[in-house]
Amino acid sequence: MVIPTQCQTVINANGLFTKY
């Protein structure tokens, strides 16, 4: 599993976009 270390948008398990 990749841990985001910068501001980026990923798709979570629910298929929703989550901004980190």
Image (cartoon, grey):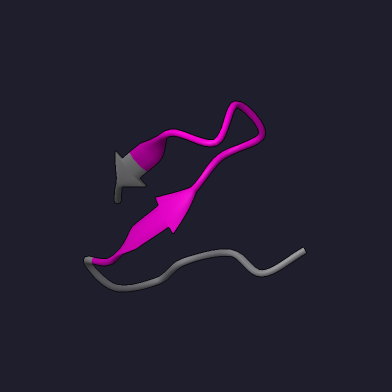
Residue 5 within the segment the image draws in magenta? no
**Quadrant of the snapshot with the N terminus:** bottom right
On the rendered structure, is 11 left or right of 2?
left
Q: Quadrant of residue 17?
A: top left
The residue drawn where x is 49% and y is 49% is: 11
Q: Which one is in front, 13 or 6?
A: 13
- Please give left or right for residue 3 compared with residue 17 in the image: right
**Which residue occupies 43% across, 56% down?**
10
> In the image shown, does 10 or 6 lie closer to the viewer?
10
Q: Position of residue 8 (x, y in %)?
A: 27, 66
Q: Residue at x 66, y 69 (%)?
A: 2
Q: Residue furthest top?
A: 14
Q: Which residues are magenta?
A: 8-17
Where 12 falls versus 20 (above or below)?
above
Q: Is residue 9 above or below residue 15?
A: below
Residue 12, located in which quarter of the rendered image?
top right
Q: How many marks?
A: 0
State the predominant SS element of the stretch in magenta: loop
Q: Is 1 left or right of 13, judged from the image as shown? A: right
Is residue 13 found inside the magenta-colored segment of the image?
yes
Tell me where residue 5 appears, x and y as whole percent: 40, 71
Q: Quadrant of residue 13?
A: top right
Q: Residue furthest right?
A: 1
